[in-house]
Amino acid sequence: MTEDAAKRWKITLTYRYDDGPRKTVFFIEEMTELAPIIEHGQDWNAMVDCRITYNGRNYPEDWTVEQIAKHA
């Protein structure tokens, strides 16, 4: 795993291009890092999708909020 891939959040931005949609992936540690990526990236009028997913798990994927709170 690269150092970037170890960061907490995975951002997948999809933009429309003449030859079809293209995805770009970024890894960030804090949500405050997202604004500059969008503001200074491709024109957001061509953005199709912005997906933010948690990139790390300390507990099993199927655990609920209540289960994690009991073990925190």
Image (spheres, rainbow, N blue to C red):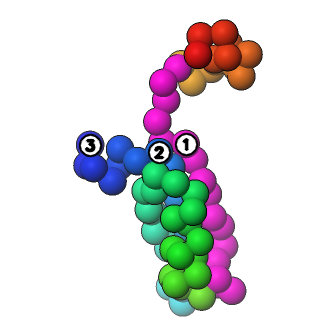
Nearer the observer: mark 2 or 3; the answer is: 2
Specify whether residue 1 is in view: yes
Q: Which residue carries the number 3 mark? A: 1
Q: Of label 2 and label 1, which has the lower sequence position?
A: 2
> Which mark's residue is nearer the viewer, 2 or 1?
2
Residue 8's x, y, as percent? 47, 45
- Does the rendering let one see residue 21? no
Which residue has dot 2 on it? 8
The residue that appears at 52% across and 84% down in the rendered structure is 40
Is residue 72 positioned above or below 61 on the image?
above
In the current view of this chain or complex, which residue is farthest to the right? 66
Between 67 and 22, the one lying in front of the other is 67
As helix, strand or loop, the secondary structure at mark 2 comes to loop
| x and y percentages locating residue 10 in the rendered image | 49, 52
In the rendered structure, does residue 17 fall within the stretch colored magenta? no
Check contact, mark 2 vs mark 1: CB within 8 A: yes
> CB of mark 1 within 8 Å of CB of mark 3?
no
Please give the name of the residue rendered at 67% of the width and 16% of the height, measured from the top-left corner: 69
* Label located before the other in sequence (1 or 3): 3
Judged from the image, the secondary structure of the residue bearing numbered disc 3 is loop
Residue 61 image-quadrant placement = top right
Tell me how far mark 1 sits from mark 3, CA to CA.
16 Å
- How crowded is the residue under tag 2: few (<14 C-alpha within 10 Å), some, or many (20+)? some
Q: Please state the extent of the stretch shown in magenta in the rendering.
A: 44-59
- Where residue 67 appears, as percent x and y from the top left, is 68, 13
Identified at 69% across, 86% down, the residue is 45
Instruction: Name the image quarter holding residue 54.
Output: top right
Q: Residues within 10 Å of mark 3 (few under 14, many from 20)?
A: few
Which residue corresponds to mark 1?
54
Q: Find the distance from the CA under tag 2 to the CA under tag 1.
A: 6 Å
Viewer-proximal residue, 63 or 33?
33
Quadrant where the N terminus sits is: top left
